[in-house]
Amino acid sequence: MKLSDSLNENTLVLDDIFKDCNDIIKREFTINEKKAVAYFVETAVSSVTLEEIALGVTDTVKVETVQDAVTGVLIGDAVVIIEGDTGGIQIKSIGYPSLGISEVENEKTMRGSREAFSESEKSNTALIRKRVRSTDLKVIEKSKGRYSNTNVAVVYMDSIVRKNVLKEVLEAMNGFSTDGIMDSGVIEQLTEKFSYSPFPQYQVTERPDRAAMAVLDGRIVILSDNSPNALILPVNYGSFFKTPDDYYRKFQISSFTRFIRYIAAFLAMTFPAFYLSVIKFHTEIIPSQLALSFSKARAGVPFSAFMEVILMELSFELIREASVRIPGPMGNTMGIVGGLIVGSAAVNAKLASPIIVIVVAITALCSFAVPNEEFVAAFRLMKYLLIVLSSFWGVYGLVLGLIGVTIHLAGLNSFHFPYLSPACSGEINKQYDKKDFLIKYPAKKMNLRSMFSSPYNREK
Amino acid sequence: MFFENGRISAGQIYRMIVTEFVGITIVTAPLITADKCGRDGLIAIFLSGVFATIYTLVILKICEAMSDSLLEELDKRGYKKTGKIIALVFGFKYLAAMVVTMFLLANMVRQLLLSCYQSYFVIIPMALLLIYSFTMDVEARARFYETIYHFVLIPAIIVIFISFGKCDRWNITPLFMGNMRTTVLTAFIYMLMSAPAEMLLFSRKHFSPDKEMKKQTARAIAVNTLFGMVYFIMDVGIYGIRGYLSGNYLSIMQTVGHIESITSLFLIISMFGAVNCYGVYAVKMYEHILKGKPDYQYLCRWVAVIVAAIIASTGVMNGMMVTFATEISRRPDIEDTDYIQAMGIDYNRGRYDVWYQVANDKNVYWHGENMQTAAEDYEYMTSGSADFSHMSAIVLGRNVLESKKALGNVADFIRSHSQIAKDLLIVAAEEKAKDVDGIKGSDISKMFHGNLPFFECLSYQYVDVVKDKYKCIMLGMISGEKVPECQKAVLLNSDGTLSILDINAGKMIALMNKEMTGQTFRIKNVYQYRVIENHYDVNLKIIGRETIGVNITLTGSIKDLSENTRTKDRQLESIEQEISKEINDIIYKNNMDYFRVYDRLSVSDRSLWVKYMGNRKALYKRIYYNVFVKYHIS
């Protein structure tokens, strides 16, 4: 329904729509001796904006229909209807209140920016724009969610991105319908292809510098209101092991730490299973003294080795979950107390052996060494499968489990990029991506972009 | 879209062929070719690689003329029946290959990793994994092999480096010894059995048969051939041809030791790849045969679902059975296991007295009439499970060595416990094993390993050259003072006999075997000549063109001879003749090279050794034994 030039008619319609929406303010005023009415969400539109409206100095968009006017109000802008003018004016404002820009919590690095994304899509877009000051950086904004009308932005570099991928992403964004989007995770789940795989097909980050590096690499970033996490796609296996400070530090150190992460990920998945298979099936591979030491350590423990491993791992998962949920300093205390309970007291009470505490601790440390929590969470799940297989068939079961996981990963892709690249399908980019895979080459040797970028614009 | 286009690159095909088939090449190529061609197996493997390469290039040439797979192409050109016949033949071949490879793999797992499991328990999780992998498309398969390529090749190379140190160069040379016709035929047959590239015919639409493809497939075949040849050299180098053939295809893995044998896990991955590859193509063939027959396809779908359900449910049932009925539920935890570090065995009037030295400094005594029950009885006595995988030494009392029955029983005991390490030290006590029970197994090991430079020069090397089938075989004499009494090495042969080698003299000085040791000769029902010591001084002499004389001097003791000198001389002469005849009968009856004449020839007369390399039976006929008997009168 179009907005008419009659102020009374328009206000009647809008008043009816906004009936009982007490947070939506209606303000009447005069512009150039003409009556005008402004509708806005009280906390989303600041007094600065109202002054600018009065001065006539604002960032505006014309709205023609009632629906556009309503949407404009709901997304946090002000909509002004002026007597005698057909349609209305949507005036950009600071948007809904949010936490603001804070320090990175979950992706800490030794070097690099400390800024984290906020919960405002506009602020987040600005944070990327701050780092990529180019008109080639495009931002396509959409409103998603039938009732939430959440602002979602698709950010990319026009000359670097693969157009096919972009087209597919935009189609995927248009291809779902939902009531509301409370976090970018909802978008991730509604657009990913392999829903049943525990391995993530998007990379999630709270760091603007990482998002900026991703767009410069030809990838696409999706930002959503109400979410401090940006989605980066496409991804591959190697993406989850890279951190921004790999590119800020010397290549020798970066290579070493990255290699450690790969080992950590492998151990996070296989260490308990390997321990179980060795002490149950293959004690001959360890020295006699060590076997004896294990034997003495386990003497008096009432549970079988399998039960012991499972119980300790589940206990650690409980502590991990509890410490995340408990607020503030109590969370830290919980970690310490939990560790004391599980570690020391359980050993003293002969409920667990010291060896298993070490195994669980090493496994946990390894899982924390991997930079991406969603990615390592999949490994944590696989760990239990491997524990069960090892308890039945020892190292043979472990190897079969690893083969199964590899087969699964080989079948995954992220917007048609093989998940296991660049370990496989390296010829997509003439094996260049292997320079930034297990180890990282010096920056001077890395003069091409990765396989995610357009093949016509690979040179940096 | 751009990467999901159903096509695989030349590089991916290279990695697929190598990863899928390197394991099976290593396992089967040396054994098959050595069996048929002896030392010329090396040439056979090389030739099979050449034939396979030519075959592949021909296949790729055929592929150039096609745009689709061979079967689709035949259908398009109106040769449907021919296509189905080809599909049937190849389908059967791939199915058979898949089944054989799966059982090879199960056997390997049982032998190396899970000795307590039945084959089908080991096969079931493999089958379930295969069904899962069959759901992947060809691109996913290619990515899988591309990813695990290094995880297969690197351990294979590590095994090479570890094992080459154990090779004996005399076993490796010379080459080009056998029948060329047999060698070429074997190479051709092996190529037909294992040519992986023919599967390219059935995957034509997934690749381009360009120059790069030809180069990469030839490279893959060359890599597999090279691995086959290197493993052939290693297997023969360590065991010799006869020893290798009398062993099994996993001997090389067991040789490298326990920890290194975990690198054999690469074989599981590679052989899984081979099973997967054969299985996928077998399914493709049968799908083609049933194509266009909707009823059959409908039926097949249901059969597939039912089979999968049966496997899954039996997998679950077997999983439960595995839990309750197999070792897993009875498998003792590490704290309930007693690690035996050494055993001492004495034999006294049909009874074995055994002491076990356990890792926690506990000594356990057992006695029984059969060594086979020794391990089981241990568990009854101590309520702990005996684990022999960390045993470093077995001490044999003299009475064991002198009793053929006891010796055989002990040898059977060692053979039946596959977990016993290859580097087990077998030591003889001066008198009774019980006398040395104060010495720890680890100390015994250190004692002899400390002297190994002497043993290594001769006995270890000699042991490797002689090569029995099973266990490490080096034995020295020790006394209660913890000092090796003398530099002797005793070999436990595969037939249960022992040979004693005098290190200092560098020659075999004794042979105790089931027939000779403890044997009492009755000479004309009058005298008793009891052999209490066997010392054999062996000298080779080439007589005429190729007759080999072996002079053996046997020392023994005699009792109850006549007091009269002339009569005594006649008696002794008669004894000498009788014993010579007995020894000659034993040697020729058993047709065994007790005195290692063949290996001595490799040192003394190389050309003769080379000549008889492939035909030892002919050599035995040329050996003439002269037996001289020296005796002590007791």
Image: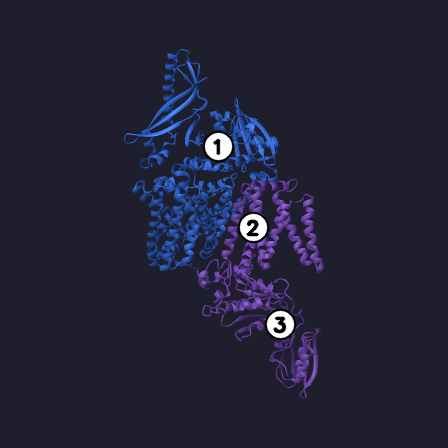
Quadrant assignment, res A222 = bottom right
Q: Is residue A120 above or below residue B165?
A: below
Q: Is residue A3 above or below residue B437?
A: below
| Chain of the residue displaying label 2 | A
Do the numbered discs 1 and 2 sit on residues whose CB atoms are within 8 Å? no
Distance, label 1 to label 3, CA atoms, is: 81 Å
Q: How many marks?
A: 3
* Nearest-to-viewer mark from 1 and 2: 1
Disc number for residue A270: 2
- Residue reaching furthest top? B564
Per the image, label 2 sits on a secondary structure element best described as helix
CA gap, disc 3 and disc 2: 41 Å
User: Considering depth in this image, is A377 or B360 the residue closer to the camera?
Assistant: B360
Q: Which residue is mark 3?
A: A123
In the rendered image, the residue lying farthest to the left is B545
Which label belongs to residue B211?
A: none
- What shade has chain A been given? purple
Provide the secondary structure element on which disc 1 rests. Answer: loop
The mark found on residue B475 in the picture is: 1
Sequence-first tag of 3 and 2:
3
Nearer the observer, A98 or A441: A441
Secondary structure at numbered mark 3: helix
Rendered position, B626 above or below B4: above
Q: Position of residue A262 (x, y in %)?
A: 54, 56
Q: Residue at x 64, y 50 (%)?
A: A314
Q: Amino acid at mark 3?
A: Ser
For label 3, the crowd category at 10 Å Cα-Cα, with few meaning under 14, some 14 to 19 and many 20 or more, is some
